[in-house]
Amino acid sequence: MSGDRIIAGIQKSPAYQSAVQSLDRDHDRFVNEIVALTEIPAPPFGEEKRGLAWRALLAGSGLTDIETDAEGNVMGLRRGTGAPGGKLVVISAHLDTVFPAGVDVKVKRQGTRLSAPGIGDDSRGLAALLAYARALDAGQVETKSDILFVATVGEEGPGDLRGMRYFFTKGPYRNRVAAFFSLDGIDPSRVTNGAVGSKRYRVTFKGPGGHSFGAFGIVNPMVAMSKAVTDLYEVVPPTNPKTTFAAAVTGGGTSVNSIPDSAYMEFDMRSESAVELAGLEKRFLAIIDKAVAGENAARSTRAGSITADKKQIGDRPAGMTAAHADIVTLTAAAAKAQGYRPQFNASSTDANMPISLGIPAVTIGSGGRGDRAHAPDEFIDVEKGESVKGLTVGLLALIATANAQP
Amino acid sequence: MSGDRIIAGIQKSPAYQSAVQSLDRDHDRFVNEIVALTEIPAPPFGEEKRGLAWRALLAGSGLTDIETDAEGNVMGLRRGTGAPGGKLVVISAHLDTVFPAGVDVKVKRQGTRLSAPGIGDDSRGLAALLAYARALDAGQVETKSDILFVATVGEEGPGDLRGMRYFFTKGPYRNRVAAFFSLDGIDPSRVTNGAVGSKRYRVTFKGPGGHSFGAFGIVNPMVAMSKAVTDLYEVVPPTNPKTTFAAAVTGGGTSVNSIPDSAYMEFDMRSESAVELAGLEKRFLAIIDKAVAGENAARSTRAGSITADKKQIGDRPAGMTAAHADIVTLTAAAAKAQGYRPQFNASSTDANMPISLGIPAVTIGSGGRGDRAHAPDEFIDVEKGESVKGLTVGLLALIATANAQP
């Protein structure tokens, strides 16, 4: 049966219609929970309080097995009609924001427009999980698979997917996931089935340093660094799967009188393909070593040699959920059923982790309007009609996927 | 007549011997003036108060035509036996220190050891000028040429020789200087007849910047900068006259997620030869332009092109006073006569300016012992025997040079 027909079938069911009525009836509460969650700061590595609040809000949603794992992910289970302990579908949103501690997170309201750092990315997603759980409960919607609702930690940059890394390598559900939704941001037409992987390094080049006139002729770490940059930029990566690199941040030296004893460069490498990313990383590391050796050969090491400390500061796996996978076709059909044109793309989200493990996963939006994610003036609009319509995309896709499992 | 015989002749003269007795008798006052001058902060561009104090201390030294020029150099004239307005000999020391405002300049005494920032570089030189003027006056020493005593501004790094640049381009004595002494630091064996010139640039490379994945393929200012560094380091400068360059300080970029929109590098170039320095500078500037053009050709400029802002942040002229010039042979003879082995070398001091104009000039020390110039724990030892012996080197060289002018 086509995705469109499956979705249409769900839409006609009284249980689903009852669930949507719950979303509609419950909308003020949903908005209040968005505000409450947003106003609890959740910087990278500081998600605990927001996690506790989200866990408290699960009360009355009908979920069982509520727990917080060792990494800080908070989760609750909704049983399906299958045998206990079988494959399940995860739907998640992330607790952390990009904003450091101390940023004002008070929500400003102007009619249906709510503005605050992190409100769309990803407080609305967290609140949507709560609304979905209550709606499914209210509608007594049955699914074949269990559904696990998870509020994750460490999705944003510095967190480096630590929440999902733990969940899929050490967590109790690590071998039970049949499909995975990440509810991230708001765009309800989003069907992100590509996981852009990234490798990030901070490379610190060190040498003896010395007086720029008196010690002239000795090795200079900035020359090794520069050679690494120019050699990296000779690499021509594939455009499909899209693969990129960047020399992004640099610093070093103390005085124009001196040959520096240290300089660093932060490099970013990304790819839609894990194979391409691994190949690029290998080449990059060889380029660094060659640049260091070249500088040590080109100038005097009488006062000391150049070394490079290659510190990995980011590692997100790449991959792709096939366009014909159930979760992709059902999500696209759900979006279309609500009048949205599905946008297939690749990004870097919590879904990177399951995708890299071959588990079908997509990242979708929680609906409504808004903009300025990652900026202090981030906002969403919770006008009820658009807001509920957007929410139903995820709900339809979730029910359909939880029924699609064998 | 050889330099040694000229110096020996001066040493035998009653007038000179009387002048040395004055230096000896006056030594406590000399030390007190070192302390007083040191304890007046004189950071680059903040020499005015120390200049006023030095000017006040000239009272009773027999100098005339005392004035402070528009740049801040303070000076007084000692007439010779020649006609007024003729060629003259300058002896100078510098008012400024490398230390910024706010550094504690209180002098700590331990016996004959005096410690404070700037005390040897160049408070002792400033006090030596005062002691010389009084000693010449006390001994009624006659010289053929006039002698101009100058306390200069802007000798240290950021000052970029602004005092001497003004003196030799706009000052009232600019066309009258036959020979020039810079009394800088303490080493009494120093005969610095080479002027190491320098050219310093801060080059800021700018481009459009963008998301490291989404905007991949656009030009990156760090690549242009890196190419400039690697190309510069392909240059093989002469070892004699010694010519050097350095990529010294760098910074740029804001986030490992982003292609940077800006990066800068500070470069230092030096040479004992003005011709070599000019050639290196020209080549350097061409390397920058080529690196920028190369990056604009290598990657997309759809969002904007790379530009380079080449800001000169230092310019000190190079040159050499010939080893057979009177001022060099007489200074070397004076040092030898006092038991020091003359050390000919090249440096960057106030003497760079006259040397670059073809005016015979040397930089010498004011005597005594000490160390740690440019460091907060700088110190001198004013043990009287060594201190006065060191002072006499400059006095002998000054008298001999002021008598050597035709």
Image (cartoon, coloured by chain):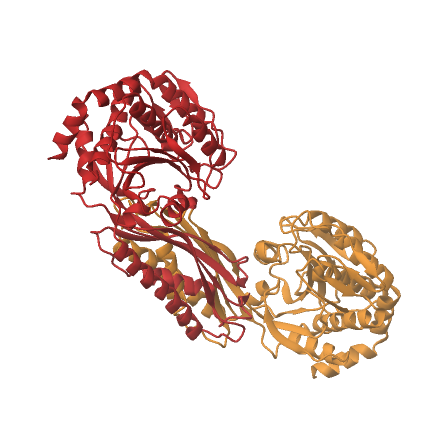
Chain colours: A orange, B red
In the image, residue A54 sits, relative to residue B372, either above or below, namely: below
Lateral position of residue A279 relative to residue B360, left or right: right
The C terminus of chain A, quarter of image = bottom right
* Residue A88 appears left or right of A264: right
Q: Which corner quadrant of the image does residue B283 belong to?
A: bottom left
Work out which residue is located at the far front of the displayed protein and give it. Answer: B83
x, y percent for residue A24: 86, 68
Would you say residue B307 is visible in this rendering?
Answer: yes
- Residue A387 x %, y %: 80, 69
Tell me what residue is drawn at x 35 percent, y 43 percent.
B173
Between residue A43 and residue A325, name the one nearer to us. A43
- Say which quadrant the N terminus of chain A sits in: bottom right
Instruction: From the viewer's side, name the closer residue of B146 and B347.
Output: B146
Q: Is residue B153 left or right of residue A300?
A: right
Give the quadrant of residue B51.
top left
In this rendering, is residue B63 above or below B204? Answer: above
Residue B125 coordinates in the image, percent (x, y): 35, 31
At 18% from the left and 24% from the top, the residue drawn is B11
Q: Position of residue B54 (x, y in %)?
A: 43, 30
Q: Residue furthest left?
A: B1
Q: Is residue B264 above or below residue B15?
A: below
Give the camera-side residue of A106 and B347: B347
